[in-house]
Image: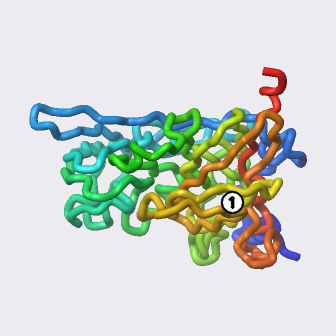
């Protein structure tokens, strides 16, 4: 059958070298999970903002070019917010009056859209709200919705896909008195962990391959053979014997994930796009389309050695997404390792 890799090779040939060969790295595409999942998961910084004399909570955000090492020794040109790739978790509370100072330090125009935030359209960074290079845009709005996991990303006309692919995205956490009162794991980075899942294709020189032209590999949306979680390819997270909450964002351009743990353990979904569910839902699989969020709680133990893996979108599971759709290219996404806790 035609795998995505073959498809891209074919496309590359068809374009007669218009794009460089796709990367087949020795590390991130190593054959065995033990060789692949060698990098620790990164935890994005949290931005709590600062208050002015009127009580408005202010967040300073800067869209910028950067570069980051994803594969082998190469540096990948990227875009980020307050960093090289992706942006901080913006943490707000219900009823807060907030101001976002969004400075565009890119060499190109962009926007920043608050995905899922209930707010007046003129305060949202949709395609109508272009920020020219060198300009700071400062929308103000009140947080008028329950606790939830939202996100922000570029929404630049005709450039959204490319800019998000290069890293212009981040999470927004809304907290309220309900989320504070529930006995949910809520220690950020310890038992309350964001997982921004994205798939990417790399050129041989380490740069991102993004080609959504009619003849390009991303004509139906870019899908990749390298999984990034919080910007780290095929990461490992050391886990402890405790309930752990994951706030998962499908930050991919086109891939729909059907996620499960490799031992098919049960977990509880506690929140979706709109916030906390009325009751927890036991699941073994979770389907997430691009832009969707879900919060889950899973119990780890000291001898755990499990992966979160993608079964693909079709009912038959991995490998059945069809030629060129890439569903057969991305199985294990992140490794959870409790084994070093043995005897501790
Ligand atoms: Cu969006």
Task: Write the residue at 22% across / 39% down.
Answer: 57
Q: Quadrant of ligand 1?
A: bottom left
User: In front here: 51 or 219?
Assistant: 51
Percent x, y of residue 51: 20, 33
Q: Image point 10% across, 37% down: which residue?
A: 54
Q: Residue furthest top?
A: 344
Looking at the image, residue 285 sits to the left or right of residue 100; the answer is right
Q: Position of residue 75 (x, y in %)?
A: 63, 37
Q: Is residue 202 left or right of residue 277?
A: right
Task: Using a 10 Å C-alpha cutoff, classify the residue at mark 1 as few (fewer than 14 neighbours), some (14 to 19) or many (20 or more).
Answer: many
Res 18 visible: no
Q: Nearer the viewer, residue 163 or 313?
A: 313
Q: How is the image coloured?
A: rainbow
Residue in the image at 60% along x and 75% along y: 220
Q: Which residue is mark 1?
A: 224
Q: Is mark 1 within 8 Å of ligand 1?
A: no
Does residue 168 show up? yes
What residue is drawn where x is 34% and y is 57%? Answer: 146
Quarter of the C terminus within the rendering: top right
Which quarter of the figure is the N terminus placed in?
bottom right
Expressed as whole percent of the image width and height from the top left, the position of residue 252 reads: 58, 60
| In front of the other: 1 or 180 | 180
Q: Is residue 53 above or below residue 62?
A: above
Q: Is residue 3 left or right of residue 194?
A: right
How many labels sit on residues?
A: 1
- Please state if 120 lies on the left or on the right of 213 as rendered: left
Q: Secondary structure at mark 1?
A: loop
In the rendered image of this protein, does residue 336 appear above or below residue 333? above
Question: Which of the 4 image quarters holds residue 268?
Answer: bottom right
Where is residue 233 drawn, in percent x and y?
69, 44
């Amino acid at each position: 059958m035609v795998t995505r890799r073959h498809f891209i090779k074919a496309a590359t040939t068809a374009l007669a070298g218009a794009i460089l060969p796709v990367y087949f790295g020795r590390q991130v595409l190593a054959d065995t999970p033990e060789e692949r999942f060698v990098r620790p998961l990164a935890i994005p910084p949290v931005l709590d903002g600062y208050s002015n004399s009127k009580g408005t909570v202010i967040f300073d955000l800067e869209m910028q070019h950067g570069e980051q090492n994803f594969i082998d020794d190469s540096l990948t040109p990227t875009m980020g917010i307050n960093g090289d790739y992706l942006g901080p978790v913006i943490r707000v509370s219900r009823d807060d009056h907030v101001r976002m100072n969004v400075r565009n330090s890119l060499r190109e125009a962009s926007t920043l859209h608050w995905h899922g935030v209930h707010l007046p359209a003129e305060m949202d960074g949709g395609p109508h709200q272009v920020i020219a290079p060198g300009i700071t845009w400062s929308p103000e709005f009140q947080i008028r919705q329950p606790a939830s996991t939202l996100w922000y990303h570029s929404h630049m006309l005709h450039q959204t896909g490319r800019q998000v692919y290069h890293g212009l995205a981040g999470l927004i956490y809304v907290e309220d008195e309900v989320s504070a009162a529930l006995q949910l794991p809520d220690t950020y980075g310890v038992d309350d962990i964001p997982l921004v899942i994205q798939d990417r294709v790399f050129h041989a020189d380490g740069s991102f391959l993004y080609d959504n032209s009619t003849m390009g590999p991303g004509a139906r949306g870019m899908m990749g053979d390298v999984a990034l979680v919080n910007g780290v390819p095929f990461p490992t997270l050391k886990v402890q014997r405790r309930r752990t909450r994951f706030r998962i964002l499908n930050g991919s351009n086109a891939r729909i994930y059907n996620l499960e743990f490799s031992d098919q353990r049960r977990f509880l979904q506690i929140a979706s796009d709109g916030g906390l569910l009325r009751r927890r839902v036991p699941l073994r699989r979770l389907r997430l389309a691009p832009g969707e969020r879900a919060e889950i709680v899973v119990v780890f133990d000291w001898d755990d050695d499990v992966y979160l893996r993608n079964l693909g979108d079709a009912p038959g599971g991995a490998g059945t997404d069809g030629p060129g759709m890439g569903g057969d290219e991305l199985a294990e996404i992140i490794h959870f390792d409790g084994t070093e806790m043995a005897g501790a």
